[in-house]
Amino acid sequence: MEGRLWQPFRIGRMELKNRVVMAPIVTRYATDEGYVTERLKNYCEARARGGAALLILEASCIHPGGRTFANQLGIMDDAFIPGLRELVRVIHKHGARAAIQLEHGGRMAKSELTGMQPVAPSPLAMPGGEVPRELTVDGIAEIVTFFARAALRAKKAGFDGIEIHGAHSFLIDQFLSRASNKRRDAYGGDVRNRARFLIEVTKAVREAVGDDCTVWCRINGREYGTPEGETLEEARETARLAQEAGCEAIHVSGYGPRAPNNLTTPTFVPAVLEDLAEGIKKAVTVPVIAVGRITPEAGERILKEGKADLIAIAKALLADPELPNKVASGRLEDITPCIVCMRCRDGLRSTKFVGIKCSVNAALGREVEYRISPARKSRKVLVIGGGPAGMEAARVAARRGHQVTLWEKEARLGGQLIQAAIPPHKDRIAPLANYLQTQLGKLGVRVELRKEATVAMIGAFKPEVLILATGVKPLLPDIPGLDKAHVVQTGDVLEGRAKVGNKVAIIGGELVGCETAEFLAERGKKVTVMRRGQQMALGVGPSLRPSFLDRLGEKGVALLTEVKYHEVTSDGVVITNREGRKETVEADTIVLAAGAVPENKLYQEIKDKVSETYLIGDCVEPRTIRDAIADGYRIALKI
């Protein structure tokens, strides 16, 4: 495919084969101490091989006191250089350039990781964070030297470029923002003073690496939803000062509790920060890197309109490292789509596992051990169930050379992905179902719809491998009177198969119940959601949950927690509320969203009749899209 995205470009002395940049995104693939691992090398190599011209390595800690994440990549000592050199080597092997982002967490650093009190321009804590120690002028100067020393290590490791992290509320950005910088000395007050730390770091880094490394910075074009946060006009002035200090490009991001790059929209909108890149582009003469959910089509348009010079992509390259190569060769239908679920971002806070994960790419962080390779022997494989687990199993098995047939009892493929894509803010799930269905067609998987499997049918088919992905069935709560009222299931509501009155009570306040509530509220219904638990929608990740609950409140949805159900009557649902009072929640329609149970009856009947039988997806246990995809991928590699 021709276009500006594929034109060579130059930042300073660094020549790039195209204009696609892998944006820095924290992976937590380093060791506990911050050293490079084989996992991190394999991750980077896959994205270099995939066609991105420049890989900017994640926020790398320049000093032990600035550590922000567990397993954060380090560059705080010469001992890190050999591993970083290996990382550069595997990136260079595929014709890509390598840059590293230098970061100090400031007040975002955690004493449980560092053993030290965090530092900041002012003694103001992040929400829920520790109170930091205010930096002295001498302390600021010391941190400037830490940046310079880290930059020199990066140069010795062979990096082509260095990005100074001045965004996302890390230390440099804490100086830039009036919300976190209340100083009255030369480092506080107007924009020039608040940018002084960034300028001193830039000059020190520039001096440390000379002309051999290209140097630039990343800044917020704006802070969203933060009182006294940075404005675009302030960011334009900061960008001009950074250019004067020696930055050879400006990477423009956005930050804050209402930042559009960290939230969803009612329907998918690409390039949510392009106005910020355009605003900075008008203020500087050095190249501008745009970021923020930019699709290839939007990236091409942004370049054509002169709003930016390079297009940075992060989450979409987690979902599919081959995205640039696929776009360049016109294979758009083969791109595994990012569904903007933010599970990758949420995983950075996880204590359950180490390393970023992706809902649609089970091979993320396992690029070598999960490589799809030909099977030793082609086998006759039967997959029952056309949801995400079944389709992914069929896709990977077919790619390995197996003869795959998929039976689906419904008239369409997609399973729960179909309904999941209907509520507001969820349309980005539909491309995943379309992608999987397209791949099955291209790979020659025999798909038979409206075919509900029985033991006899399976016996007649004689599969060598049987994979069951039969999903779930709704859980019916034990509440008296359900048979006497107008009771419907969420799926029937979302797909328009059930009539819904004006007053709706939803029993069940997890993800599906709350999404159905928003769906109905947008259609003018008066909706009450109830659950026995203490909190609503715990299945929504922490990145999106606050804004999701805010939307429900703004749309008038009543959320009742810690209820005790008594009965359902023609008037509604009789409950005891959290205050201990008995009341009737009036409703002419009761919607059940009380959860689901595995549909594994067929497995119990067939497991001893086919020697190699596997159970995957929700019929093992109701879980997430990520779990379904991971199950399907893993079993298809095994057979």
Image (tube, rainbow, N blue to C red):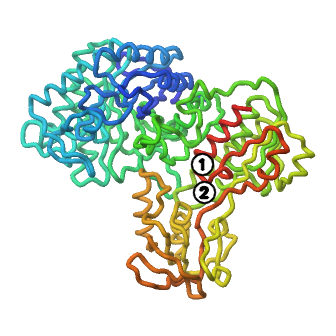
Q: Position of residue 545 (x, y in %)?
A: 43, 56
With 31 as the anchor, is 462 left or right in this view?
Answer: right
The quarter of the picture where the N terminus appears is top right
Q: Are marks 2 and 1 in contact (CB under 8 Å)?
A: yes
Question: Callout 2: helix, strand or loop?
Answer: helix
Question: Is residue 286 shown to the viewer in this render?
Answer: no
With 489 as the anchor, is 98 left or right in this view?
Answer: left
Q: Position of residue 581 (x, y in %)?
A: 41, 83
Amino acid type shown at disc 2: Ala
Q: Nearer the viewer, residue 514 or 323?
A: 514
Mark 2 vs mark 1: give the one in front.
1
Q: Which residue is mark 2?
A: 420
Residue at 56% x, 62% y: name it.
512
Residue at 45% x, 29% y: name it.
29
With 304 as the anchor, is 111 left or right in this view?
Answer: left
Q: Earlier in the sequence, mark 2 or mark 1?
A: 2
Q: Position of residue 559 (x, y in %)?
A: 44, 71
Q: Which residue is mark 1?
A: 625
